Structure formats: C-alpha cells, structure tokens
Image: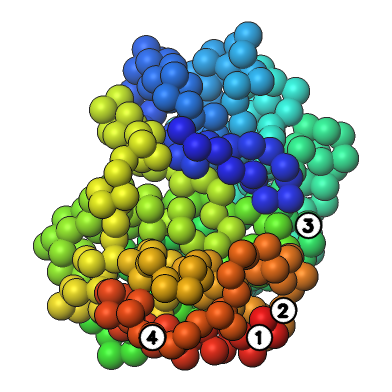
Amino acid sequence: MRYRKLGRTGISVSEVGLGSEAFVGRDDDFAQELIDTALQAGVNYFDLYNPEPYIRDSMGKAMAGRREQFVIQAHLCSAWMDGQYKRTRNIETVRSACEDLFRRLKTDYVDVGMIHYLDEQKDYDAVFHGPVMEYARELKAAGKILHLGMSTHNPRVAIQAAESGEIDVIMFSVNPAYDILPPNEDVNALFEKSTYEAPDVLSCTDPERLKLYSLCESEGVALTVMKPYGGGALLDADESPFGAAMTAAQCLHYCLTRPAVACVLAGARTKEELLGAAAYSELPEEEKDFARLLGNTPAHRFTDKCMYCGHCAPCTAGIDIASVNKFADLCEAQHMVPETVREHYGALKVKAGSCVKCGACETRCPFDVKITEHMQKAYEIFGA
C-alpha cells in the first residue's frame, strides 16, 4: 500500500480506503473480519456515513485498543430515525446523532468530520450560514473533530467549500464518466445512462470539475473519492457510457491520477473485493492503464486533453510531459499561477522550454493531444 498526505491536514492516508456500505445488513462478525482484512492490507482510511446503530457499534468495537491505526472520516447530519437513515439539517437531530456517533465509536475524536451530502445551492447556503456549521465549529474547537470536511457530488458547491477556507477535505464523486458531465444538483442524473446521450455532454473533462481539482490542489484541500466505479456501471460494458468495461484497477488509477486526490474509497462487499482494490499499488502499469480504453471508445472519446497517463514517454528531451501538462492545466483552470504549482513546476529537472518539437510523443498519445503546442503553452505560463 502506498500513502499520501491528506492535503494540508498532513495526515498520512492509504491510497485506497474502505467505505461502510459493505456493512449494511451484515452481522458484526462480517464487519470485524472485513476491517481486520483492511488493516492487514495497509488500509488506514475509513469512511463512516452510515447512522445505523449496529454499524457504528461494529466500527467502535474494531477500533478498541488500536484507535491510532484508524483515520476516521465520519459524517455529521446523518441520523437514524424511525428505523431508517435520514439526512437532516435539524440542529437538535444533528447534535443527537453526533453524540450517538461518539458514544458508539467509543472515541474522543474523529479525524475528519464530514458535513453530509450537500448538492444543492440553497442547502449549502443554509448549512454554511446556519447552526449546522456553528455546531461543526464548536466540535472542532473542542477537539472532537480534528478537521472539517464536506461530501458532495456537485463541483459548483465543492468549489465554494474549497474557497471558504474552512473545509480541509471534500468527499467527491470522481470517475471518467462523471467528469464529462456539467454540474447538476440532481445526483440521480449521474446514474442515468440517458444523461450521457444528451447532445451537450462533453468528450473531455468538464471545466468546472477541472477548476475544482486545480483549486483543491493549490489550496491543499484533499479530495477523498466516492463512486470510483460509477455505482458499478463502469465495470459493465452494457451500462458504461463509454461502451466498454473498465476494470476496478483502471478506475482506481484514473481517480488517483487526478489532482488533489488523496484516497479512493473503493466499494468492497467481500474480503476478495477489498484485497483486490488494496493490491492496486502492486499491480504492473499495464493492468492499471486506462488510456487506450478511454482513447478508443466509440462514445465520449477523450480528445486533445491530457489525461496524465504517461503514454507519451519517453521524451527525447527528458521532459516529464504528463507533469508539465498537469501543472499547466492547474494554472489554466484558475486563470493564475498558484505559488504551490509554481514550486512544483520549478522542481522539475527538465522544463517545457526544452521541447525540441520532434513530435515523437504525439504519435504515442491515445488522446490526440497536440503535445508540442501544450509544451509551448506551459513555457509561456511558467517562463521556462
């Protein structure tokens, strides 16, 4: 397992994490075995959005005597009411559900307190300017929440959270299918195949999603990924909007090559699925490679947009083309050169200005990127 910094929090987290959906409807023995398997595989990041009492109890039991092995991302505004899960903004219910969370986890703190599921603008405004955010600040001031986070599927809302200065971690839905869609307050649109048949759907990454990734990278706001497999649709050729099935490893690799992504919370219903995802870092590059598939699918083929896949290498001048393109894209998305990006670019041994325009890289690119033009653009951005 490889580890990354969780943005400006400085916490070291596993590239692959574990969500809690697998525990729904399963007994405590199953939960304990799955959590033990995760820890043995090097997983240390766990998302807990579920308010079900038995799931919270299972996580608390698993952490007993080894709390330091867990980085917990737990959700506020997720409550168990009348025997079912509810997303709530009622402050008394939020408080009660949060107190229940700490009591069942048997811990004094959670590493990341996620404000749960903010997709609509009016909901975002009400939360960030109301009692829910005030309560979250109280918990942080008391040390019960070490860092504040928020979960959303809407890049427009996520951008506002990143710009607020209060949110250190954003749980966001990332995969190549969702990335081509414009912002939408209706999360169900992401899962409907008809959405991808609309005439205005892009064949490259939506500009607002690019802006989100760029902003988070430059501000040190970490992205933790949900829905890396698109609810399973990307793993099924008949359901995928690309008309071809991706593997789990390809989906994970796509997510982990996006800027600002620290951890992907892979869906795992069994030990075998979990171990398969956790083994991602040990796989050969050809098994993780998503470029040929996305570059040659019959629908929504990505074109003239660097996907940071590295197929262009080796450069005859020694340029790390994928990194140069990534840093230039980060600047273009924000219409500025963030100092952090300038520093990363400055650390490259060979800069874009060294491009000799031989074009060898372009013959290898699955996405028909005009690489020599991109190198010139990067030279103009960074002056080297």
Q: Name the residue rendered at 21%, 70% in the picture.
A: 242
**Kind of residue at disc 1:** Ile
Under tag 1, what secondary structure? helix
- Sequence-wise, which precedes: disc 4 or disc 2? 2
Residue holding disc 3 = 166
Marks 1,2: beta carbons within 8 A: yes
Marks 1,3: beta carbons within 8 A: no
Q: CA distance from mark 1 to mark 4?
A: 21 Å
Q: CA distance from mark 4 to mark 2?
A: 28 Å
Residue holding disc 4 = 358
Mark 3: give few (<14), some (14-19) or many (20+) Cα within 10 Å. some
Residue holding disc 2 = 337
Marks 3,4: beta carbons within 8 A: no
Mark 2: give few (<14), some (14-19) or many (20+) Cα within 10 Å. some
Q: Name the residue rendered at 46%, 33% in the picture.
A: 1
Q: CA distance from mark 3 to mark 2?
A: 22 Å
Percent position (x, y) of residue 151? 57, 54
Residue holding disc 1 = 381
Q: Name the residue rendered at 40%, 40% in the picture.
A: 281
